[in-house]
């Protein structure tokens, strides 16, 4: 099984290093309700502007509700469908665009929902699950299929489950599964005191 732990230059938390986005999922392994509740609980404790908690998630489980899973799956683009078909769980990520106390636009809604989502995915890693976020899907179709109003922004769909050997994947996914994980150098986007003055 591919283990693409981050080759971190400085010391980082083990779970942060371990999380990565594989495409090979074990289609035979169900994710327990307890684990699903646990990852949602982790997201629930994320910080947010005025504690609005603008995030909304829908869990689609292929094992327990194939009809709604298939509806969500049909919104993924062809590229993502080719590998995500083995993931037993899809998760729709949505942000409520307004502050509930005054209906003003909440410009931190996406930021806060992203924060909640990474908490969710790190908790999933801790539980031995793997996840892969997707932006490649039809947002309008997804909102329509699940009758969600335009007060919400559809941000991503996450494939979740247990990892499988990469040889179940077709190319080019199989080759990419073992490709090195790369990041920009720290000095490229982390500054000290002044804009573009590298911290490192
Ligand atoms: C918002 C978002 C959208 C993404 N969309 C896709 C996608 O549509 N298809 C895909 O295969 N990967 C997608 N990815 C996965 C990224 O390519 C991946 O996170 C990135 O290459 C870093 O790899 P790592 O997560 O293994 O560290 C997306 C990731 C994010 C955060």
Image (cartoon, helix red, strand yellow):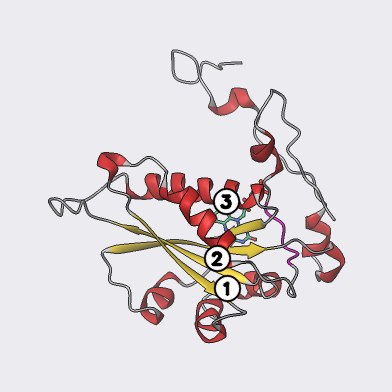
Give yes or no for residue 24 being in the magenta stretch: yes
Q: Position of residue 48 (x, y in %)?
A: 34, 42
At 48% from the left edge and 56% from the top edge, which residue is drawn?
A: 40
Q: Earlier in the sequence, mark 2 or mark 3?
A: 3
Q: Can you name the residue that lies furthest to the top here? A: 193
What are the residue bounds of the magenta stretch?
A: 21-25
> Percent position (x, y) of residue 45?
42, 44
Answer above or below: position of 39 versus 167: above
Q: Residues within 10 Å of mark 2 (few under 14, many from 20)?
A: some
- Name the dominant secondary structure of the magenta segment: loop
Marks 2/3: CA distance? 19 Å
Q: In this view, does 102 lie to the left or right of 91?
A: left
Residue at which label 1 appears: 77
Tell me: is circle 1 under 8 Å from ligand 1. Answer: yes
Front one among 136 and 67:
67
3D distance between C-alphas at marks 1 and 3: 22 Å
Question: Which residue matches tag 3?
Answer: 121
């Amino acid at each position: 099984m591919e283990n693409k732990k981050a080759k971190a230059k400085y010391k980082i938390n083990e779970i942060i290093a371990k999380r990565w986005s594989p495409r090979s999922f074990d289609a035979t392994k169900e994710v327990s309700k307890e684990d699903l509740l646990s990852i949602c609980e982790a997201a629930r404790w994320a910080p947010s502007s005025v504690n609005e908690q603008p995030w909304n998630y829908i869990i689609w489980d292929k094992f327990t509700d194939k009809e709604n899973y298939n509806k969500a799956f049909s919104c993924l683009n062809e590229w993502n469908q080719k590998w995500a078909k083995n993931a037993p769980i899809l998760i729709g990520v949505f942000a409520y665009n307004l502050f509930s106390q005054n209906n003003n636009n909440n410009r931190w809604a996406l930021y806060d929902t992203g924060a909640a989502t990474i908490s969710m995915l790190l908790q999933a890693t801790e539980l031995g699950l793997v996840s892969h976020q997707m932006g490649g899907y039809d947002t309008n179709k997804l909102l329509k299929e699940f009758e969600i109003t335009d007060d919400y922004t559809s941000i991503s769909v996450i494939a979740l489950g247990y990892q499988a050997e990469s040889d179940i994947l077709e190319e080019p996914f199989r080759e990419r599964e073992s490709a090195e994980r790369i990041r920009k150098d720290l000095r490229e986007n982390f500054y000290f005191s002044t804009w573009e003055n590298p911290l490192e």
